[in-house]
């Protein structure tokens, strides 16, 4: 059974995902729980999600950035950074690792979080951008701690844990009962225009109900697979 995640001594967490809204499918409720404890949480998005709606990309990019900022404000995120990798056309390689490692060195998180990046996710074949971002994030944590890699990005920084939300075999959980759960729902609802383009999409409450489980001492928890780095 998954263990309760101990946040003792954790001051800063960096969440790295591919698109606006990726964190709002469960992880944002855990973020709300962490920020309520006084932990500083930063978001890094690799793309603006510009190919994710029916409208032209040049219209969608700023719209989705604004909705993501609203979602961040609801759960208490300290900073939002959106990079310019192409939505739906990300390619694995050094450029992605370098970009993430640079933000790790800048923000100096104790932990780094991403979403499920397995080829086959619970909802089907995972998006290529999710797969590339998640794998690169794990590598970038080690890159950021190696002074001989990307020395132009500043002094090395060691993050001690790598958390993957929505993993098939979780090892730890975060209690999100009450206000954190409600804020998680509200953070997904903040993507109003995006969800409006998906008429068959489950409601934000339904999404978060399916993303949480009863485990340990919690009737409502978000689970992660956790690696010590």
Image (spheres, rainbow, N blue to C red):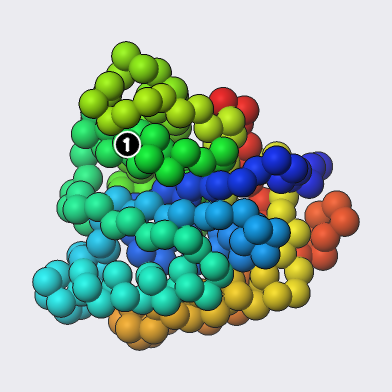
Q: Viewed as shown, does residue 78 lie left or right of 53?
A: right
Pick the quarter of the image with the N terminus.
Answer: top right
Residue placed at 74% from the left, 43% from the top? 8
Foreground residue among 128 and 103:
103
Q: Residues within 10 Å of mark 1 (few under 14, many from 20)?
A: many
Label total for image: 1
Q: In the rendered image, is residue 125 in sight?
A: no
Above or below, comparing residue 185 to residue 157 in the picture: below
Above or below, comparing residue 56 to residue 221 in the picture: below
| Most distant residue in the top direction | 148
Pick the quarter of the image with the C terminus.
Answer: top right
| Most distant residue in the right direction | 217
Above or below, comparing residue 167 to residue 63 in the picture: above
Specify the quadrant of the image occupied by residue 146.
top left
Residue placed at 26% from the left, 63% from the top? 49
Residue under label 1:
102
The percent position of residue 61, horizontal first and vertical second, equals 21, 69
The percent position of residue 155, horizontal first and vertical second, equals 37, 26
| Most distant residue in the front direction | 155
The percent position of residue 72, horizontal first and vertical second, equals 46, 69
């Amino acid at each position: 059974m998954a263990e309760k995640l101990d946040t003792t001594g954790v001051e800063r967490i960096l969440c790295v995902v591919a698109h606006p809204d990726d964190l709002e499918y469960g992880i944002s409720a855990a973020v709300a729980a962490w920020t309520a404890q006084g932990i500083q949480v930063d978001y890094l998005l690799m793309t603006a999600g510009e190919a994710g709606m029916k409208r032209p990309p040049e219209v969608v990019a700023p719209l989705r950035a604004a909705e993501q900022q609203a979602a961040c404000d609801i759960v208490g995120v300290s900073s939002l950074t959106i990079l310019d990798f192409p939505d739906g056309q990300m390619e694995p390689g050094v450029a992605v690792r370098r970009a993430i490692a640079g933000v790790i060195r800048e923000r100096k998180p104790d932990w780094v979080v991403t979403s499920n990046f397995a080829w086959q996710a619970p909802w089907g074949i995972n998006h290529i951008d999710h797969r590339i971002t998640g794998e690169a994030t794990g590598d970038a944590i080690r890159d950021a701690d190696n002074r001989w890699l990307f020395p132009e990005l500043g002094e090395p920084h060691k993050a001690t844990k790598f958390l993957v939300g929505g993993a098939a075999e979780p090892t730890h959980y975060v209690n999100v009962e009450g206000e954190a759960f409600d804020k998680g729902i509200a953070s997904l609802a903040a993507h109003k225009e995006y969800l409006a383009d998906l008429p068959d999409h489950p409601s934000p409450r339904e999404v978060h109900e399916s993303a949480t489980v009863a485990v340990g001492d919690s009737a409502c928890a978000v689970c992660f697979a956790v690696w010590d780095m």
